[in-house]
Image (cartoon, helix red, strand yellow):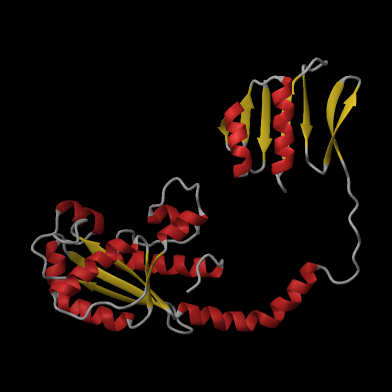
Amino acid sequence: MIVITLSKTPNSLRGDLTKWCQEIQTGVYVGNLNAKVRELLWERIEKNIGGGEATMVYNTNNELGYTFRTNRKDKRVVDFDGIPFLMHINKPSDVVLGFSNAAKFHKVHRVSSSAKKIENQNELQNFVAIDLETTGLNSEKDRIISIAAVKYIKKNDPEVFYRLIKDIPEVPEHISKLTGLTTKKLRDSGVSLRDALIEFKKFVGSRLIVGYNLPFDMSFLENSIKKESLNSLENRAKDILPIVKRKNKFLEDYHLDTVLKKYDIENENPHHADSDAKSTWYLTKKLIEIKSLII
């Protein structure tokens, strides 16, 4: 029996490995080969692994019952009274006179910090975060009950746009429990959908529209704008959910509240469009700061 571990598996190797072995985990192959096939397979690995690392463990007649080999440059297999060991090879580093990378970085950081602040402010002014609450999930049949948008105003906290929509036949009970919005509250405090959309478009301007699971919100907006015979939105749009998934592959789930906890962002009032939009704005700001998103 043999076990082979690889730091990477080039396509030129995968065929040989899967022909003779079973991949039980990424980069880990197990098989039962004779000595001739084992030697030929190791030759193939050394020839095709490139800059990767490979280690093979296999049965043999010694005190342990197995031995191993590796192509790692910092390790060497040595035999001590019939027992194999991996010896670590210390390679002395060359001393290079001059400033360290940290010192150089600090110097550059001091010089460019002001410019970066200006750049970040410009980036923050270039987008608006939005969120909607609706009576359901079907943008053709269900209705918008609240619209929110958040944008950056220089040297101030983000500015929030928030409107309740009054011309709704009835808010489903489960939606009222989730959002706190009842039919009575909408009729008492809301505005018409048409007025809300006109104000929303004016608030957004030509900025990039961002949102969390944005296609959902955009489908409702576009259908509502069409029904109200208004000019369509021509803004660029960016959904930040795929970016979060790409950067955080092992989260338990990708609900907004889970992601906000990951980035230490507080949502004061979940499932309320104004609070969700503000949290999405801060999440977008964080992604820009850590260079996960370029506006």
Question: The N terminus is located in which quarter?
Answer: top right
Q: 245 above or below 287?
A: above
Residue 17, placed above or below residue 35: below
Most foreground residue, 85 or 103: 85
What residue is rendered at 39% in x and 56% in y?
256
Measured as percent of width and height from the top left, residue 263 is found at 50, 59
Q: Is residue 126 left or right of residue 88?
A: left
Residue in the foreground of this view, choosing between 36 and 159: 36
Residue depicted at x 25% and y 59%: 179
Above or below: residue 245 compared with residue 223: above
User: Total marks drawn?
Assistant: 0
Instruction: Name the foreground residue: 242 vs 6.
Output: 6
Residue 30: which quarter of the image?
Answer: top right
Q: Which residue, as the protein is rendered here, is positioned at the far left? A: 169
Residue 21 shows in this picture: no
259 up-or-down from 206: above or below: above
Residue 232 appearing in the image: yes
Within the image, what quadrant is residue 206 found in?
bottom left
Q: Is residue 63 left or right of residue 209?
A: right
Q: Residue at x 67, y 27 (%)?
A: 3
Res. 268 image quadrant: bottom left
Image coordinates of residue 219 in percent, x first then y, are: 25, 65
